[in-house]
Amino acid sequence: MGHAPHILVVDDHRQIRESVSRFLEKNGMRATAAKDASEMDARLSAGDFDLLVLDVMMPGESGLSVCQRLSAEGRIPIIMLTALGQETDRIVGLEIGADDYLTKPFNPRELLARIKAVLRRTEKPETHAGSLAGKTVRFADLVLDADRHVIDDDRGNRIPLTTADFKLLTVLLERSRKVLTREQLLDLTAGRAAGPMNRSIDNQISRLRRKIEPDPLQPRIITTVRNGGYCLAADVEVID
């Protein structure tokens, strides 16, 4: 990323959004603040942002609703801020498209580290495609445009993918019919080891299944292998 990353901080608590914005700017980033979803939409339409820091609990449209809406459009990486004890919100946030989450109260340095980690994964989309960069890929009854990060199904529907969705799908497509453990998937998609309670890959798989499986409750494309991990159970055809 050749410019200073521009972060949009959305939180209804003035002190939080202003202190976070000041901290990010002191550490080489640009920051813009918004107090709610309406103001956030206005900022997004008027500017170019690299990442969204988004509070879950806000008046009006909630952070979870915003996350789901923006993730469906594949517009911008999102880090959710959740209050201590809101375990369900954290899980739901990851399932509907958040790239990471942080529990309040938090150390600003940890937020900065998480922002940098997400930006490293998203700043060069072409590297996410690996050997599929610039290709069109057919699998199951779906066609992936690796450059545009969208899938077309056989009913004419176009499905946008978030950066996390696209990275995970690319890893699976490059290793179709192979069983990959959660540890392998986390290493290949995020470059880090999985902790004993890490559920991020399971959440990402669930989110991706809801986008590409005819019946996400009985998946046929991305299958679960008991005591093994996950497998893309489809033949893959790369179209130049």
Image (tube, grey):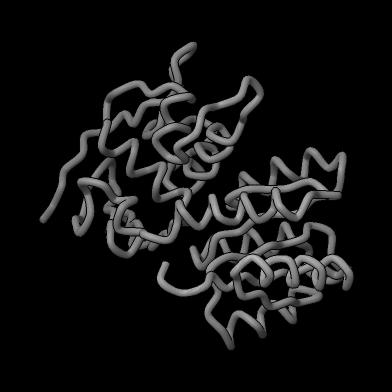
Q: Position of residue 239 (x, y in %)?
A: 13, 52
Query: Residue at position x 71%, y 69% from top?
Result: 9
Residue 222 x %, y %: 40, 32
Image-quadrant location for residue 170: top left
13 w.r.t. 145: above or below: below
Q: Residue furthest bottom?
A: 46
Query: Residue 144 versus residue 111: which sits nearer the camera?
Result: 111
The quarter in which the N terminus is drawn is: bottom left
Q: Is residue 65 left or right of residue 126?
A: right
Position of 232 compared to 131: left or right?
A: right
The front one of 234 and 11 is 11
Q: Position of residue 169 (x, y in %)?
A: 37, 43
> Does 98 appear above or below 172?
below
Query: In the image, what residue occupies the spot 74% across and 80% down?
Result: 38
Q: In the image shown, does 28 or 184 lie closer to the viewer?
A: 28
Q: Residue at x 55, y 32 (%)?
A: 202
Residue 41 at x, y = what percent?
66, 79
Residue at 62%, 28% (x, y): give it: 198
Residue extending farthest left: 240
Q: How many marks?
A: 0
Task: Answer above or below: position of 22 versus 167.
Answer: below
Q: Quadrant of residue 67?
A: bottom right
Looking at the picture, does residue 120 appear above or below residue 222?
Answer: below
Q: Say which quadrant the C terminus sits in.
A: bottom left
